[in-house]
């Protein structure tokens, strides 16, 4: 190899760790999603079927395909990836396509032959796997035989899925193949819920086959998009086939390191009492969640880069990469070992003890989980080190280690299983993993020299150093120097002092008038300071709207009766004559329609049935929607202001959600649904859960956008926790219309995300989060979707009767309508209801309400306002930058959600809620986006290129940054 070639290769792998982390994000998040959904599936299965002989039979029948397929996958991963990756780089597309087609055809033939052989010899195979149940539990063995023809075909599908996933991973495509795996447990759980009672455990087999077929379809589609071409050929003479086959068969036996253990454990578990095999599998499911997420993802992500380092014989980099990820995985698994060993009983009870899964099953499974958790650390280390052997091409060594592991596992199971039963079998598994780890590490050290595994990697030492020292002292020093240079009384400071003096004078004059009306005068005095301050510090006014507005008029007495709304409204409306409102109109042309709509409402002053003071209060609060939108567009002119303003909106939402959850536990601050008896939280919004639901439906997309802008693991974890909190609070409102509208809005948001990778990440993460929420609510026995089955759903909880009354009393000839609040007065007088009860005194439909109160013209202006918002967001999206597109996606999804909710709720005109919707849809039009600097990157030739030139590429620079962040 020439020096120039070596340098070029070194340049390509210089960022190996960075690439591994990027791949690791996709794989770890996908593994987490699959494991969480798999755990949900296991909860449903255990609750439906318990832990009896039927589940023992299913696990015995499914053990052969679910063990052989991963072994074949391990062999393909170790043998195909290095050769195929090298051919993609050095050879032609035609050569790569020919190799792919040949391997695929060979695997199809092999899968068919294996499946046929398994079906032909199913009785001997089942007898070998579980000899104990054939003798002591013949009924269980009979059930296993009946399930075998339905579960054995899964072998071929799993092998094909693993092969296609390996090829896509070798080509750098990690996201789609990994996320497609969630279809299997999701489909299985669905089948069990649908037909589990009538068909029994057979639905587990049917669901698994259907799920594997769906996964294969998704992976084939992604391979087509990656330009992996299939030809109906099988060329057994291509030179790349020989090294693949040479490396595959020892790697196949190497897969026994992790996959032979379930076979041996089932063999000895069959001699234990009924339910032991099911308990072993349930414990393995729980144990596989952290192991699959952590060291499986690390091993798969690191293998291609370890292979490249081994190919150029850069052993120093090879050892450094291996040591780094061994330390990362080791530290993580040590913490998990302690937590899962001592918390096994709590974990199993919380997750599985439902339905037919009783306390005895919990105790049995918990002991086995504790025994398996002891060996989590050596399992992780052994898995990663075995990948190092695969990268070095020394897979024959793994075959010998696998043989020892199988013998050691059987010996330990025979000894400890007889002594301690199911726990003894689990402990024996952990013990042989310790032995395997030691053998692998010693062998690798002999091959490549000292590994220095006890020396912490420099990357971890650097992280510890930064955490211990931090960057705060430097930031404090910069702030101190900045303040120190401005201690003189400058012109700006004198100007500021004059303003403070004027404010104090106003306060003094107001105090002097306290003799006549002390309370009113003091309020005016304090209010004058507040108004002048907010008029001067306009951005602070926006922050006040974001933080305080939602609490005004709530059930919290601190924010009522203090004229806070007046203190915010007055400077806001005055600023309309100061800021360039015309510019805001140009940036967001929908604002003139809303201004015209609010002016039209004002014209109905004389015909409105409500008193003048109440009318003006309601009208000015609605005009605030327009005014705050203008201020948002004009004042948000840099990124810091944008993010701080968004954080100011999220902060009260966190309190409101927590307050609602506390109310749910104490049955306060909410209402009890009369038809279901469930408690619906309303938090600070009196006894109106729909108002809380609409408020959260606006804030949740804002939180999602903010999550994409976070940097740092702790911040991202905190952002995810906030999102989970708001989603849970939304679910506990049990408001059907809001839940459906939010779901539709989030789907629209995902569709408008700026890249397929971000879409996949959003779908995967969203599914995982929803799964976590449903898991939590299932464990807490909270039926989130119960109200969808109520008998009143046909009339939308009686709303259709209210709408019919509005339509019956509507007069199209009244162009001005009947005035503000006239629909409420009408329904109050009509007392619409049935069974002696009144349904409601509000229209619960902003369109019919606007038509009745403001006439056809008013309705038309409102519809034009909504339609123009949607049109402008779509038009803005076309020429927007990457981050702006993410914001627009959230705003447009929220717009769709609000439009849908308008059919069943009029809370959009609630001052505490609706203003946040207008703020959100105004943010994409603010000044900041004009000043946003493009992200500068380089093209393939090394020339500078900004983000705008990359918008149509597959992986823009901003997208890479966003993916790395999430």
Image (cartoon, rainbow, N blue to C red):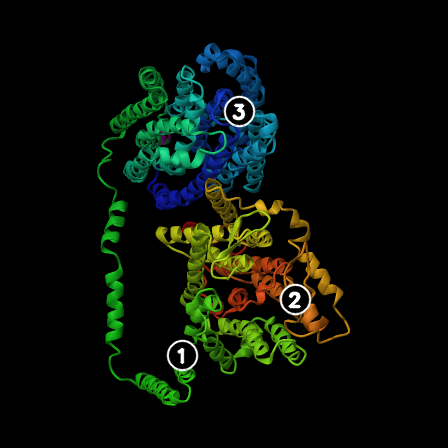
Q: Where does the image place residue 381, in percent across and percent down from the top left? A: 31, 32
Mark-to-mark CA distance, 2 and 1: 39 Å
Q: Which residue is mark 3?
A: 155
- Residue, far front: 836
Q: Residue at x 41, y 73 (%)?
A: 540
Mark-to-mark CA distance, 2 and 3: 66 Å
Mark before the other along the chain sequence, 2 or 3? 3
SS assignment for the magenta stretch, majority: helix
Q: Nearer the viewer, mark 2 or mark 3?
A: 2
Task: Look at the numbered disc 3 and give the secondary structure of its residue.
Answer: helix
Mark before the other along the chain sequence, 3 or 1? 3
Q: Nearer the viewer, mark 3 or mark 1?
A: 1
Q: Residues within 10 Å of mark 2 (few under 14, many from 20)?
A: some
Q: Where does the image place residue 954, in percent across and percent down from the top left? A: 52, 50
Q: Quadrant of residue 401?
A: top left
Q: Quadrant of residue 367?
A: top left
Indicate whether residue 388 is drawn in magenta: yes
Q: Where does the image place residue 123, in percent across and percent down from the top left? A: 53, 12
Bounds of the magenta span?
386-390
Which of 454/768 is in front?
A: 768
What mark, if any, has residue 530 been given in the picture? 1
Q: Is residue 359 visible?
A: yes
Q: Which residue is mark 2?
A: 828
- Residue, far top: 135
Q: Residues within 10 Å of mark 3 (few under 14, many from 20)?
A: many
Which of 618/714 is in front?
A: 618
Residue contact at pointers 2 and 1, CB within 8 angstroms: no
Task: Look at the numbered disc 1 and give the secondary structure of its residue.
Answer: helix
Which of 658/155 is in front?
A: 658
């Amino acid at each position: 190899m020439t020096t120039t070639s070596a340098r070029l290769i070194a340049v390509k792998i210089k960022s190996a760790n960075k690439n591994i982390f990027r791949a690791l994000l996709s794989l770890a998040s996908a593994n987490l999603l699959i494991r969480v959904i798999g755990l949900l599936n296991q909860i449903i299965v255990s609750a439906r079927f318990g832990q009896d002989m039927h589940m023992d039979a299913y696990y015995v029948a499914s053990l052969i395909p679910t063990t052989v397929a991963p072994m074949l996958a391990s062999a393909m991963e170790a043998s195909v990836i290095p050769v195929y990756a090298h051919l993609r780089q050095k050879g032609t597309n035609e050569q790569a396509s020919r190799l792919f087609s040949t391997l695929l055809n060979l695997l199809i033939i092999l899968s068919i032959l294996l499946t046929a052989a398994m079906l032909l010899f199913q009785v001997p195979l089942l007898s070998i796997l579980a000899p104990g149940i054939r003798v002591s539990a013949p009924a269980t063995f009979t059930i296993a035989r009946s399930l075998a023809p339905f579960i054995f075909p899964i072998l071929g599908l799993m092998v094909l899925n693993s092969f296609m996933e390996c090829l896509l991973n070798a080509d750098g495509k990690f996201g789609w193949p990994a996320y497609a795996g969630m279809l299997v447990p999701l489909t299985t759980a669905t089948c069990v819920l649908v037909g589990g009672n009538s068909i029994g455990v057979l639905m587990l087999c049917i669901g698994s086959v259907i799920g594997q077929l769906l996964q294969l379809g998704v992976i084939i589609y992604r391979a087509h998009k990656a330009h992996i071409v299939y030809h109906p050929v099988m060329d057994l003479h291509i030179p790349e086939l020989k090294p693949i086959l040479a490396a595959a068969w020892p790697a196949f036996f190497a897969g026994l390191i992790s996959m032979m253990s379930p076979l041996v454990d089932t063999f000895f578990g069959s001699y234990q009492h009924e339910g032991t095999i099911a308990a072993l599998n349930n414990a393995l499911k729980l144990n596989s969640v952290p192991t699959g997420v952590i060291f499986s993802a690390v091993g798969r992500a690191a293998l291609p880069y370890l292979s490249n380092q081994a190919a150029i014989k850069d052993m120093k980099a090879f050892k450094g990469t291996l040591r780094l990820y061994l330390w990362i995985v080791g530290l993580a698994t040590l913490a998990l070992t302690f937590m899962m060993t001592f918390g096994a009983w709590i974990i199993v009870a919380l997750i599985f003890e439902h339905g037919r899964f009783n306390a005895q099953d919990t105790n049995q499974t918990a002991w086995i989980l504790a025994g398996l958790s002891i060996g989590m650390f050596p399992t992780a280390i052994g898995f990663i080190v075995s990948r190092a052997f695969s990268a070095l091409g020394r897979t024959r060594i793994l075959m010998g280690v696998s043989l020892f592991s199988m013998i050691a596992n059987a010996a330990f199971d025979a000894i400890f299983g007889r002594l301690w039963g199911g726990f003894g079998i689990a402990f024996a598994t952990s013990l042989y993993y310790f032995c395997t780890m030691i053998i692998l590490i010693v062998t690798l050290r002999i091959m490549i020299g000292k590994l220095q595994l006890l020396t912490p990697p420099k990357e971890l030492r650097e992280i510890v150093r930064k955490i211990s020292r931090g960057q705060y002292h430097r930031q404090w020093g910069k702030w101190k120097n900045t303040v120190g240079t401005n201690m003189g009384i400058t012109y700006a400071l004198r100007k500021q002092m004059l303003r403070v003096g004027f404010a104090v004078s106003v306060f003094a004059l107001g105090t002097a008038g306290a003799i006549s009306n002390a309370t009113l005068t003091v309020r005016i005095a304090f209010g004058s300071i507040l108004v002048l301050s907010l008029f001067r510090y306009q951005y602070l006014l926006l922050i006040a709207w974001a933080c305080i507005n939602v609490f005004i008029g709530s059930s919290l007495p601190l924010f009522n009766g203090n004229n806070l709304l007046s203190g915010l409204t007055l400077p806001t409306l005055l600023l309309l004559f100061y800021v360039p409102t015309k510019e805001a109109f140009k940036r967001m042309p929908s604002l003139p329609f809303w201004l015209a709509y609010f002016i039209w409402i004002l014209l109905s002053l004389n015909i409105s049935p409500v008193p003048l003071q109440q009318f003006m209060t309601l009208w000015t609060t609605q005009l605030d929607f327009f005014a705050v939108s203008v201020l948002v567009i004009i004042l948000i002119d840099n990124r810091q202001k944008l993010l701080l303003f968004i954080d100011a909106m999220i902060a009260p939402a966190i309190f409101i959600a927590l307050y609602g959850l506390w109310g749910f536990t104490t049955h306060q601050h909410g209402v009890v649904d009369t038809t279901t008896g469930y408690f619906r939280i309303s938090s600070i919004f009196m006894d109106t859960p729909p108002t809380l639901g609409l408020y959260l439906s606006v804030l949740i997309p804002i939180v999602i956008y903010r999550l994409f802008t976070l940097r740092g693991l702790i911040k991202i974890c905190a952002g995810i926790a906030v999102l989970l909190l708001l989603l849970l609070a939304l679910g506990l409102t049990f408001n059907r219309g809001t839940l459906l509208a939010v779901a539709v809005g989030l789907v629209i948001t995902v569709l408008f995300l700026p890249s397929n990778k971000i879409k996949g990440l959003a779908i995967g993460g969203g599914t995982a989060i929803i799964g976590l929420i449903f898991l939590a609510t299932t464990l807490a026995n909270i039926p989130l979707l119960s109200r969808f089955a109520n008998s009143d759903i046909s009339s939308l909880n009686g709303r259709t009767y209210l709408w019919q009354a509005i339509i019956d009393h509507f007069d199209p000839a009244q162009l001005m309508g009947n005035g503000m609040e006239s629909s409420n007065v009408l329904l109050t007088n009509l007392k619409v209801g049935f069974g002696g009860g009144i349904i409601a005194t509000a229209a619960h439909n902003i369109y019919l309400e606007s038509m009745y109160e403001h006439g056809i013209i008013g309705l038309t202006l409102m519809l034009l306002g909504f339609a123009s918002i949607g049109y402008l967001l779509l038009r803005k999206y076309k020429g927007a930058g990457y981050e702006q597109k993410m914001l627009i996606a959230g705003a447009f999804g929220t717009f769709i959600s609000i439009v849908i909710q308008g059919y069943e709720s009029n809370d959009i005109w609630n001052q505490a809620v609706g203003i946040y919707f207008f703020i959100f849809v105004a943010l994409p039009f603010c000044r900041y986006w004009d000043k946003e600097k493009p992200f500068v990157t380089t093209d393939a030739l090394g020339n500078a290129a900004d983000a705008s030139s990359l918008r149509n590429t597959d992986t823009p620079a901003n997208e890479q940054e966003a993916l790395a962040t999430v």
